[in-house]
Image (spheres, rainbow, N blue to C red):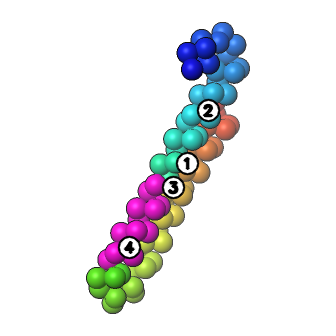
Amino acid sequence: MVELFAQTDIDSSIAISKGIMLGIAFGAAAIGLGLVGSNYMKALGRNPEAGKAAGSVVIIAAMIEVTALLAFLLGAFLF
């Protein structure tokens, strides 16, 4: 692992840093979507009439997805 980061080639270190950044961003987005869905299902199990408020959960999930998309665009095109 030490030899991986001891490279002097700038292009390979940029590619490695992009991969790490995108991996963390997509992993965090997946965990966030899982937590939102899990907690929504728990709340729906406790109070079935709360299913009418599903629109707000979809909006929150879309915000998480937009955050992951912005991280992808930042990593892929800006650096």
Q: Position of residue 65 (x, y in %)?
A: 54, 58
Q: Nearer the viewer, residue 8 or 64?
A: 8
Q: Sequence-wise, which precedes: disc 3 or disc 4?
A: 3
Residue found 51% across the figure and 64% down from its top: 62
Dividing the picture into quarters, in which one does residue 14 lie? top right
Mark 3 and mark 4 residues within 8 Å of each other at the beta carbon: no
- Cα separation between marks 3 and 2: 18 Å
> Which residues, given as a range, are shown in magenta?
31-43
Q: Give the SS element for disc 2.
A: helix
- Image coords of residue 30 (percent x, y): 51, 55
Q: For mark 1, give the secondary structure.
A: helix
Figure quadrant of the C terminus: top right
Q: Can see residue 78?
A: yes
Residue 40: which disc? Answer: 4
**Which of labels 3 and 2 is toward the front?**
3
Of labels 2 and 4, earlier in sequence is 2
Dots 1, 3 in contact, CB < 8 A: yes
In the orientation shown, which residue stands out farthest toward the left?
46
State if disc 1 and disc 2 touch (CB < 8 Å).
no
Mark 2, residue position: 18
Q: Amino acid at mark 1?
A: Phe
